Amino acid sequence: MHQAPLSRKAILITRARQQQQSLAERVRRHGGVPFSLPCLELMPLLPNIRRAVKHMTAGDDVLFSSANGVHCFSRAINRLPRTVLAGMRVAAIGDKTAEALRQMDVEPSLVANPASQQGMIECYRRHGLPQRLFFFRAETGGDTLPRFLIEQGVDVQLIHAYRMRCPIGDCTAIRGMLEHGEIDAVLLGSAQTARYYVRRIGDVKLADKPVVAVLSPQVAEAAKAAGLSVQVIAEHASFDALLDALAEYFAKEK
């Protein structure tokens, strides 16, 4: 009988709590056993969104950088999102953000692929720059896109829609598993997750005991800066690709 790629491997998932289940299912499909240690916690910044909405008018451009931003926007307003966004050109960075908009009955006019600020720059170049842009994003992040747009004369309204913070809670059980070598690999999906993972464990040597698998070279840099060694980097930035790369790593280790 063919053995699943990650058969019986204990995989630590560090995504935010609301994103744990979908990744846990992927791990199980690969034959692994998921364990949970949320290392990000979403904090919506609703007053920021509500202030911005008061100034938005038909003809403006609106951009969402993530599904988290879309969900926080929906939570902040008292009307249907499609009503608030009527007459505006709505853009999304990446398919997941676009899908979150569609779930609110808003069809994005522009979708950046690859899902990056540089991808959005290329998208605006092809389809026309905004005159005034309301950019809903996390409190921290790159400034490549807003800097480019401002240099092109665009009026950019940058709205911090949410903050990602390090959760507080007991992780004694996971620490014990790490100490006894019972976690085979840890998945890190962002630079912030890498830093908060080390903070939650409280001991960089202990945090570094399992195989460290990361979503991108940028996450690898952050993980190394936090004191972790990195054994696996996804070929492209998706968790399916990361799990495939991890399975390949373990296959070579046999």
Image (spheres, rainbow, N blue to C red):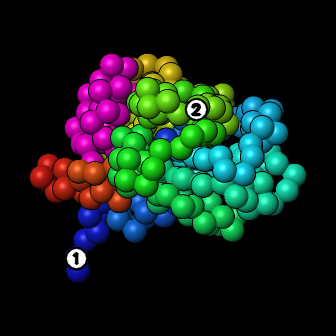
The quarter of the picture where the N terminus appears is: bottom left
Spot occupied by residue 142 in the image (x, y as percentages of width and height): 45, 29
| Residue 221: % across, % down | 29, 27
Whether residue 11 is visible to the viewer of this picture, yes or no, is: no
Looking at this view, is 122 or 247 the one in front? 122
Mark 2 residue type:
Val
The answer to which of 206 and 149 lies nearer the viewer is: 149
* Circle number at residue 82: none
- Judge whether 151 appears above or below 243 on screen: above
The one nearer the camera, 248 or 18, is: 18
Q: Residue at x 43, y 63 (%)?
A: 26
State the image quarter where residue 180 is shown. Answer: top left
The correct choice, above or below, for 111 with respect to 131 in the image is: below
**Mark-to-mark CA distance, 1 and 2:** 54 Å
Q: Circle 1 sits in a helix, a strand or a loop, which is it? A: loop
* Image position of 136 (left or right of 110): right
Report if residue 13 lies within the magenta region. no
Q: Residue furthest bottom?
A: 1
Residue at 33%, 19% (x, y): give it. 225
Q: Which residues are magenta?
A: 207-234
- For the question of whether residue 245 can be seen, the reply is yes
Could you say where residue 105 lies in the image, as x and y percent from the top left?
A: 69, 68
The residue at which mark 1 appears reads as: 2
Upstream in sequence: badge 1 or badge 2: 1
As drawn, the label of residue 156 is 2
Find residue 15 and report its horizontal and vertical position in percent: 52, 44
What's the amino acid at mark 1?
His
Q: Residue at x 35, y 65 (%)?
A: 30
Callout 2 secondary element:
strand
